[in-house]
Image (cartoon, coloured by chain):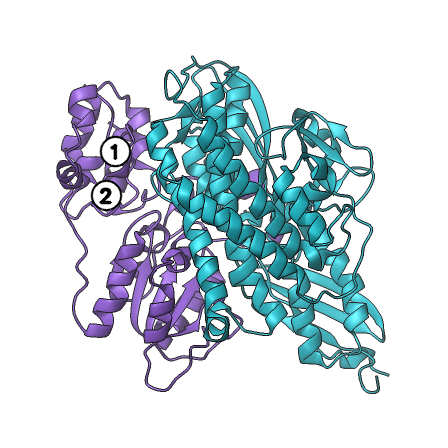
Amino acid sequence: MNGRGGRTIRVDTLARVEGEGSLYIKMAGDRVADVKLKIFEPPRLFEAFLRGRHCTEAPDITARICGICPVAYQMSAVHAVERALGIHIDPAVRLLRRLFYCGEWIESHALHIYMLHAPDFLAYEDAIAMARDHRPIVERALRLKKIGNRIVQLLGGREIHPLSATIGGFYKTPTKQTLLELRTDLEWALEASLETVRWTASLQFPNFEQDYEFVALRHPDEYPLNEGRLVSNRGLDIDVAEYEDHFLELHVKHSNALHSVVRGRSSYLVGPLARFNLNFERLPDVARKAAIEAGLRPPIKNLFRSIVVRAVELVFACSEALRAIGEYEPPPAPRIEASSRTGVGQAITEAPRGILYHRYALDEKGLILAAKIVPPTSQNLKRIEDDLREYAAQVAAWPIEEATWKCEQAVRCYDPCISCATHFLKLVVQPDDASRG
Amino acid sequence: MSSKSKGKPKIAVFKFASCDGCQLSLLDAEDELLAVAEAIEIAYFPEATRAMGKGPYDIGLVEGSITTHQDAQRIQEVRRQCKTLVTIGACATAGGIQALRNWRDVDEFVRLVYPTPQFISTLKLSTPIAEHVPVDFELRGCPINKSHLIELIVATLAGRKPAIPSYSVCMECKRRANVCIAVARSVACLGPATQAGCGALCPSYDRGCYGCYGPMETANTASLRNQLRVLGQTDDQIVRAMRGFNAWAWQFRKASEESEHP
């Protein structure tokens, strides 16, 4: 359009994301000249803090990387340390950890779908404004979220930075009866999740399909949470211990977060779309059926439909939590203790936003010699910039305020957690007078 | 969050170096959130809304510690904009886990974490908000207790002091009728020196308190250190126990330094 030959989209503080960042897109005509997702969340030096700490402190310390997904950090930490120490956990503990993780998925997905993401589709600034016109929807969201939090609270003591997960198991495991008290709420939550799938599927999505490399865990017969091989739609199929041989973290000047790439290829996508596309057959029947009825069949290549996929995962998490509660019998001991030994252990688990890698090297006393943590959002950052390069060109002719909002929305599809990635975001779209001509 | 109407008190939420957990507590108050949003205007809360309402604000909730030059300047502007300024959580109140850098060479830490350290700009110390600007009230905890947050908002709007306990975690254990894990099972526990607020969660889950709410005002850390030694803790273990999420709070700081150089 006339007068819009060269301009810049900028969002100084990206809202409804966890953590702080900005977005800057520089246009030259219809071409996107530059995209920067600038992370100005201060550097947080967790990998350095972990050196010299005891391995039993890793789940407590790494939880503090993220107040939204502390369970994910605790799960990757305990599995990595257990691998280093050669601990094989009790099947009942494994089941409890799945339940614990489902609680976090329910809480985090309900928060993102309804409170952070849905307002974009219905043109509200936030969920509170949305509640004035759609109160029952927001109330459903809050109740779902609360049920997820209740699971985490019950198993972990509190919903943010829970305290019971530890190496080898839990400090304290619940009785069967305590878990059964969750059942009625979870049965409601399963129905509410199915309604969430139908509701999100009725939203309007832009046409925006990209050719992604999807990366997620894959387990022989379960939808992935705590374990599996790491696979992609481009032939990757590795043990999690080989992660660092196949992925590389790059440091870019405009960011306090590192960008990840697949060695020899480029950006990749982790999170709900990747999990769904690579594990569709492993969804429980109720979730797979809901997906099909909502018109979702893999591969889903439209990022904007991730809200529906997240809703399908909500169905999965509720159904899986119900299964876990039904099958649970308390383990003989809350945790397996093992003696310290030198060793290295790696683990990947599926945080709500995608794969979370931890590696610890331990000395003979169990102290941490070195730690490496790669959060999901830093793995998605480069892919978000690649998407914006394509998407900004599509919306370039729009009025600037709308184009800006659209680009913000594209970022929010990823549910980015910038606090994690720094170990967030600001969108910058502004007129570039220099290139106008 | 755009619950705009004239005359409602305005609340703003600001983030510094932190995990977002304490501000999430407001969204986690599922039963109270909509009622709170009717009583007040959530004017600035980027984690929850695109609306970026301008100050001045009646209550400013500040999460996170100061770790960069830019943040040290930004907190001055935040203070000017807020009638009542409240720090929420261990980072804002005590420097948080980020304060672990305060005993070490931060440049070395940056080199450990980032491949191109020259891209990173950070301060040598992680400091609490009160070291930079006057603070009207501090909410302890890693994370804060969401009922404390609701009480704080209600009390501030009513013009009274929030009813938040300042005794130790031991009192909470007594109320819950927990058997003392330190006495009965020789488990190292920071409860006697730690401010209440969590509801004695760790002892209730069969583990020792690790000090999320920071030292109570009259903490006798010298006696606690002795007791920990009696339970078989080494000085190294005591240093680590004191250097958790409230490491820079002076009582814990002094105790960790004395254990480091006994």
Residue for point 73% across, 82% down = A399
Q: Secondary structure at mark 2?
A: loop
Which amino acid, mark 1? Ser
Name the residue rendered at 16%, 33% in the picture. B222
Q: Looking at the image, do the residues carrying marks 2 and 1 touch, with CB atoms under 8 Å apart?
A: yes
Figure colour of chain A: cyan
Q: Position of residue B70 (x, y in %)?
A: 49, 64
- As rendered, which of B90 and A337 lies closer to the eye? A337
Query: What residue lies at 25% left-to-right and 33% top-to-bottom?
Result: B204
**Residue B204: assigned label:** 1
Front one among B180 and B128: B180
Q: Report the front residue among A305 and A15.
A: A305
Q: Which lettered chain is shown in purple? A: B
User: For mark 2, what is the residue?
Assistant: B199
For mark 1, give the secondary structure: helix
On the question of residue A429 being in view, the answer is no
Specify few, some or many for label 1: CA neighbours under 10 Å numbering under 14, 14-19, or 20 or more. Answer: many
Q: Quadrant of residue A4?
A: bottom right
- Residue type pointed to by label 2: Gly
Q: Relative to residue A81, is residue B226 drawn left or right?
A: left
